[in-house]
Image (spheres, rainbow, N blue to C red):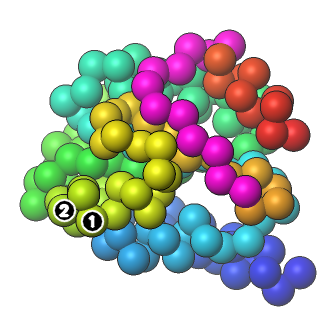
Amino acid sequence: MKSIIIALLAFGLFHSDGKLKIVSFEEFEEIIEAPSDGIRVYNFWATWCAPCIKEMPHFQTVSRSEGVELMFVSLDDGRKPDRVENFMEKRNITSPVVLLDDIDYNRWIGKVSDDWSGAIPATLFIDANGKRHFHEGEMSEQELKDFINKLK
């Protein structure tokens, strides 16, 4: 029970005011390492990535319908959070969003997944047992549902 509370606090800490939070990769690692009883989805994207933008509504819809925790992880320039905040507002992004402030991607991409080339969109799924599953590339709504259902 204590681990569930810690995970909820870690996840909720970044979203209690509904605003974008800028985090280091180390802070992000704490979030993804926190234990959870459910499936968690971390979608890596950027405001300049057309396939990322196209799939975002699918992630919001499926996360609600399938009851999974979703966090969007922006790889935009951490020095320009206004760009991401404006994007969130215009696109009605209601799911939690963090902006990684670590632009040395080569330092941490392999820590997310050995299978990640660095291309986006990319998505890290963590099942209820804490096992990581990774998908690189755009996902349709149906592909996303199917992927999540395999993890249940």
Is 133 contained in the magenta span?
yes
Quadrant of the frame with the N terminus:
bottom right
Q: Residue at x 42, y 76 (%)?
A: 27
Q: Residue at x 24, y 56 (%)?
A: 105
Judged left or right of residue 79, residue 96 is: right
Residue 31's quadrant in the figure? Answer: bottom right
Q: Which residue is mark 2?
A: 104
Q: Position of residue 34 (x, y in %)?
A: 66, 73
Q: Nearer the viewer, residue 81 or 28?
A: 28
The CA distance from mark 2 to mark 1 is 6 Å
Question: In this rendering, does residue 43 appear at all?
Answer: no
Quadrant of the frame with the C terminus:
top right
- Which amino acid type is shown beneath numbered disc 1? Arg
- Which amino acid type is shown beneath numbered disc 2? Asp
Q: Is residue 122 above or below residue 11?
A: above
Q: Position of residue 26 (x, y in %)?
A: 39, 77
- The span picked out in magenta is 131-142
Question: In this rendering, does residue 32 appear at all?
Answer: yes
Q: Residue at x 75, y 21 (%)?
A: 146
Q: Which residue is mark 1?
A: 107
Is 17 contained in the magenta span?
no
Q: Position of residue 118 (x, y in %)?
A: 31, 42
Residue 120's quadrant in the figure? Answer: top left
Secondary structure of the residue carrying tag 2 is loop
Q: Position of residue 126 (x, y in %)?
A: 68, 52
Residue 87 tag number: none
Residue, far left? 79
Q: Is residue 80 above or below residue 102?
A: above
Density class for disc 2 (Cα within 10 Å; few <14, some 14-19, many ≥20) is few
Q: Is residue 30 above or below residue 94?
A: below
